[in-house]
Image: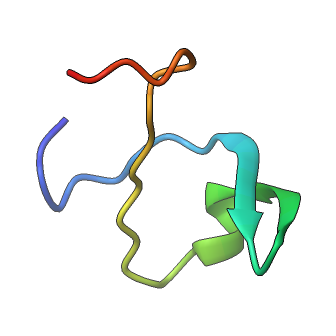
Amino acid sequence: MLVSKQAPNFTGKAFHQGKIKKVSLEDYRGKWVVVCFYPGDFTFV
């Protein structure tokens, strides 16, 4: 995927303000978003 291309919608869990909550890319439509994630086992890449 390239910068400035629209990403497909997805949902996932996020840690925000001390709680884990479900978020969707759709929640941020019309806003700039940077998505960062770690592998499931937290290994360093």
Percent across and percent down for residue 16 are 73, 72
Q: Which residue is at the front of the view, 44 or 34?
A: 44
- Pick the quarter of the image with the C terminus: top left
The colour scheme is rainbow
- Pick the quarter of the image with the N terminus: top left
Q: Looking at the picture, does residue 45 appear above or below residue 27?
A: above
Q: Which residue is at the front of the view, 41 or 37?
A: 41
Q: Is residue 17 left or right of residue 29?
A: right
Q: Is residue 36 left or right of residue 14?
A: left
Percent across and percent down for residue 21 are 87, 59
Percent across and percent down for residue 29 are 57, 74
Q: Looking at the picture, does residue 36 appear above or below residue 15?
A: above
Count of numbered marks:
0
Residue at 44% from the left image edge and 34% from the top image edge: 38
Question: In terms of image quadrants, where is residue 4?
Answer: bottom left
Residue at 49% from the left image edge and 83% from the top image edge: 30
Percent across and percent down for residue 2 are 12, 44
Q: Is residue 31 left or right of residue 19?
A: left
Residue at 60% from the left image edge and 75% from the top image edge: 28
